[in-house]
Amino acid sequence: MMKDEIKEVLISEQEIQDKCRELGQRITEEYEGRFPLVVGVLKGAMPFMADLTKRIDTHIEMDFMDVSSYGKGLVSSGEVKILKDLDTSVEGRDVLILEDIIDSGLTLSYLIELFHYRKAKSVKVVTLLDKPDGRKVDLVPDMAGFIVPDAFVVGYGLDYIERYRNLPYIGVLKPEIYES
Ligand SMILES: O=P(O)(O)OC[C@H]1O[C@H](OP(=O)(O)OP(=O)(O)O)[C@H](O)[C@@H]1O
Ligand SMILES: Nc1nc2[nH]cnc2c(=O)[nH]1
C-alpha cells in the first residue's frame, strides 16, 4: 500500500485541518469586505485550497494558475513556465496566492512580480509549508502553516514524480523509493 512507502509522517491530517481553521479565521478577519481573488497554484495547492477556502467566512473569488518550474523530480531549476493562466484580471484586486510549499521561493517570486506588473492592488501569500533552508531568493510569506526541514516532503498535494499527492498528510518517503 502507498502508506507503507512513507518513512515518517511530519504533519498529521488533524494538524493540517486545525491549521486550515486557524488560517481561515485570519484571512476572514483581514479580507472581510474586500472580495479578494484567491489564486491556487496548481497542482500542489489543490487540497490546501479546497480545505482552507471552506474556513474563510467572507466572500472570495477563486481562480487557478498552473505554473511549472522546469526540471521535475527533486530539484527545481528556477525557470518558471505558465501552463494555465488566470481567467480573471488582477488589476485593482487584492490577490491572495495559495501555495502548498515555498522552497527556493522562485515560483512565488515570479508570480508576485507578475501580479504587480498586472497592476494588482495588493499581493499576499499564504503557504501551508515553508522550507526556509531551501531559499534562493529573499521571500517571506505573509502567512505560513508549518516550517519544514530541508528534506523532500510529499503528500497533501505534494508529489514525487506525480505520485503521493493524494496522501492526507505530509511525510517523507523511504529512501528505497528513490532507488527504484
Ligand atoms: O519555492 P520553489 O522552489 O519554487 O518550489 C515550490 C513550488 O514547487 C512545487 O510545484 P511544482 O512546480 O513541482 O508543480 P506542482 O505543484 O504541479 O507539483 C510547489 O507546488 C510549489 O509551487
Ligand atoms: N513534493 C515536493 N515538491 C517540492 N517543490 C519544492 N520543494 C518540494 C518538496 O519538498 N516536495
Image: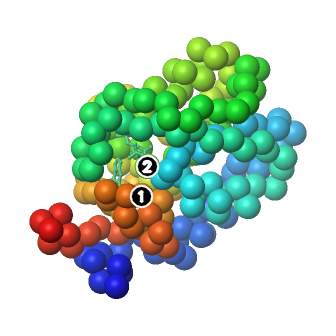
Percent coordinates x, y for residue 41 in the rendering: 54, 43
Residue, disc 2: 101
Which of the two residues, 83 or 21, is positioned nearer the viewer here?
83
| Element on which disc 1 rests | loop
What quarter of the picture does the N terminus occupy?
bottom left
Measuring from the top left, give residue 123's x and y in whole percent. 62, 29
- As shown in the figure, which amino acid type bears the numbered disc 2? Ile
Position of residue 170 measured from the top left corner of the image (x, y, whole percent): 41, 67
Q: Is mark 2 within 8 Å of ligand 1?
A: yes
- Residue shown at 54%/76% (left/top)? 14
The answer, for residue 96, to whether it is visible in the render is: yes
In depth, the one of 31 and 79 nearer the eye is 79
The residue at label 1 has a CB less than 8 Å from ligand 2: yes
Q: Are marks 1 and 2 in contact (CB under 8 Å)?
A: yes
Q: CA distance from mark 1 to mark 2?
A: 8 Å
* Residue at x-position 42% and y-position 38%: 68
Amino acid under label 1?
Answer: Leu
Q: Quadrant of the C terminus?
A: bottom left
Q: Outermost residue toward the right?
A: 33
Residue hosting label 1: 158
Residue under the point 37% across and 64% down:
163
What x and y, as percent, mark residue 70?
A: 32, 35
Number of the front mark, 1 or 2: 1
